[in-house]
Image (spheres, grey):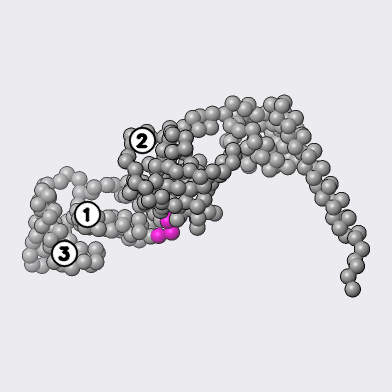
Amino acid sequence: MKIERLIGILSILLQKDTVTAPELAECFEVSRRTINRDIEELCMAGIPIVTRQGQGGGICIMEGYKMNRTLLTNVEMQDILAGLRSLDSINGTNRYGQLMEKLSAGSSDFMTGNQSVLIDLSSWYKNSLAPKIEMIRKGIDGCIELDFCYYSPKGENRRIIEPYYLIFRWSSWYVWGWCKTRKDFRLFKLNRMEDLCLSGNKFEKRKAPVPDLQDEKIFPGGIRVKAVFEPDCKWRLVEEFGTESFRELDNGKLLFQADYTDKENLITWLLSFREKAVLLEPVEIREELKKAIRKMQDKYEEYEVYKEEETDGTDQTD
């Protein structure tokens, strides 16, 4: 907390001509004696701070020492504050916002809440994500292995990793670490991790590459999709793929063309449109989708027969 307070005091001195020790003490909730010691340490660090006695006096930085009276512009400070508050949205705390407001003391825009950018990174899984994020951060900071059960399309198994980066990308949270099972760096999605715990085993940091998170690296594509959608599906196509992903036909329907990354995800996505989407290409996936729809119909018909048999049964209770 001391270094944060020193930075905060310096920020105020760069923004204001003069400030008093009582004002600083009230701002940072410490005693005047603590403020005096902080001023001495700033002077020892090479910042020429002057104290003037009497009416209109106070603490200031020596005239002519600086050309720019601000560490950051107002816009830059607002962007930093928006980013820090976004971390509060996932942790369920207000500690980042409180820290930044202390560092931005002296800027009236912050004190009156005049922020034009508000970022909320929380999700439907906020209650389960926050503890995972805190635990992963402890693992990264303390070089402690993480142990968890991981659910993937190939099944589920336990993994032990050395965590290095906590990542927010593609609207989800991931951890990048060295997987002891795969003997390589892997990306794990937090929503697929259960029974997460710190193993207690410390690890020596290895040279960890920054993950290449370009879409084409993680989602290589390869499936060229061509489909026709009803006109009232336009909003979803715009939201998920953009206006360049389709063109309107003479009959008002939408001819959609785009690259897709995974066959199973493609089928699931198309089924979410129900009868309002028809896949044209690839032909083999179109045939597979038709078989899946017929099997679904058979399942529903079997269930209807089961219900009829159940309701036609004779009641033999007394």
Which residue does the image show at 50% across and 55% down from the upper left?
128
Classify mark 3: residues with Cα within 10 Å, few (<14), some (14-19) or many (20+).
some
Q: Is residue 243 left or right of residue 121?
A: right
| C-alpha separation, residue under disc 1 versus residue under disc 3 | 13 Å
Label 1: which residue? 3
Report if residue 227 is visible in the image. Answer: yes
Q: Nearer the viewer, mark 3 or mark 2?
A: 2
Q: Main secondary structure of the magenta part?
A: helix
Q: Which numbered disc flags the more N-terminal residue, 3 or 2?
A: 3
Amino acid at dot 2: Ala
Q: Secondary structure at mark 2?
A: loop
The quadrant of the rendering that contains the N terminus is bottom left
6 within the magenta span: no
| C-alpha separation, residue under disc 3 versus residue under disc 2 | 41 Å
Q: Residue furthest left?
A: 53
Classify mark 1: residues with Cα within 10 Å, few (<14), some (14-19) or many (20+).
few
Of 175 and 148, which appears nearest the observer? 148
90 within the magenta span: yes
Q: Quadrant of residue 286?
A: top right
Residue 211 at x, y percent in the picture: 41, 35
- Which residues fall within the magenta stretch? 89-93
Label 3: which residue? 34
